[in-house]
Image (cartoon, grey):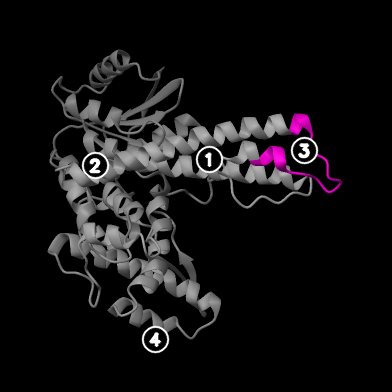
Amino acid sequence: MTATQSSSIGTCSPVLYLAFELGWNEWKLAFATAPADNPRLRSIGARNLTTLRTEITKAKQRFGLPKDCPVVSCYEAGRDGFWLHRYLLRQGIANSVVDSSSIEVKRRGRRCKTDNLDAGKLASMLIRWHRGEKKVWSVVQVPSVADEDRRQLHRDLLELKAERTQHVNRLKGLLAGCGLAVTTIDGHFPQFLTELRTWDQQPVPAALQQRLLREHERWRFVDRQIKDLENERARHIRTSEEQPVAKVRKLLNLRGIGVNSAWLYVMEFFGWRQIRNRKQLGALAGLTPTPYQSGDSDREQGISKAGNRRLRTMAVEIAWCWLHYQPHSALSEWYGKRFGKGTSRQRRIGIVALARKLLVALWRYLETDEAPAGAEVLDWKTKKNRSKATPVAV
């Protein structure tokens, strides 16, 4: 849902405004027609769409509006996702999904919070936004069902890898309690466990061995799922004719960009988002600076971190890889001149700036075929073969 779609409804004609406060068991609805109205508050069961349609009809009667009066609604982005947004659009309701972190909070009343207060506040802000005050909040760009579904593979893969790391750390931690250090966890761990001896040349206690074997079984299950997902992703890259996957292959042509980063960049951002300029791109990734200036005080508070955390983390990792794999590119030379001789803290600050610049350069590369200045471009199939002899990019 975009601002243009919502604003297509004339602000002079009567409009019914509806704000949702979504809970797991109950939804709060706040209806209004003008800023001066006391919102009409109603509670319905969560996901009860029949009652929702009934309440909208009753609200039109209560405010004396015609049956065909347009309805403008909003709710905060959260656990419920975008299914309600798609349902409301199908019902002819102009809905907006609002970024929760962008909603203003009064300093005097910041400790007061109830569902009724939240719903009423959303209704009043919706009226202001619909009548032209566009800086009231930020509206989320809703992906299509297909674009949203493409994000499941790499997000599941990230969570599985984190879970696998937990199992490895738990295995090593349990053995460390016996004075044993294990560097590698693989499929041969059960045989290796029987050969381990503690400080007094005794085998690992029987109950602990059983616990370690159960933990290893969980590790094997997660590891197998990770390999299955990685094989599925590789198969998509080789054979799929979808436009987002074509963008993945295009990013893979750049030395220093690996499968993990290319897939995440495209499926999270470049494959479906309509990005207007580089400032918007930096804000979406949470890589924009947050200055603080008041009187004689003027300092930088770091990056906002208000955007996509997955892409932001990957962007910083790729920035380090870029320095290693693309040392003669213009961006790497800029970093070397600006931060290369600085302290470790200055280099870490500089890598965030490089990550933002590189993200913009990759976006332009996908949009205009203009590769980052001085970057080495290879065929992604050739690079895959070469990666067997060199360290693999992220």
Q: Position of residue 60 (x, y in %)?
A: 23, 21
Q: Residue at the location (14% across, 65% down)?
A: 369
* Cα separation between marks 3 and 4: 55 Å
* Cα separation between marks 2 and 1: 24 Å
Q: Residue at the location (25% across, 65% down)?
A: 254
**Lower sequence index among marks 2 and 4:** 2
> What type is the residue that disc 3 sits on?
Val
Task: Give the magenta part as a residue range.
Answer: 192-208
**Residue 163 bears which disc, if any?**
1
Give yes or no for residue 157 being in the magenta stretch.
no
Tell me the quadrant of the picture where the N terminus can be found: top left
Give yes or no for residue 194 being in the magenta stretch.
yes
Q: Which residue is mark 4?
A: 337
Q: Residue at the location (29% across, 66% down)?
A: 255
Mark 2 nearby-residue class (10 Å; few <14, some 14–19, many ≥20):
some
**Lower sequence index among marks 3 and 4:** 3
Instruction: Using the image, determine if residue 208 lies above or below residue 286.
Output: above
**Lower sequence index among marks 1 and 3:** 1
The answer to which of 263 and 104 lies nearer the viewer is 263
Q: Position of residue 158 (x, y in %)?
A: 43, 44
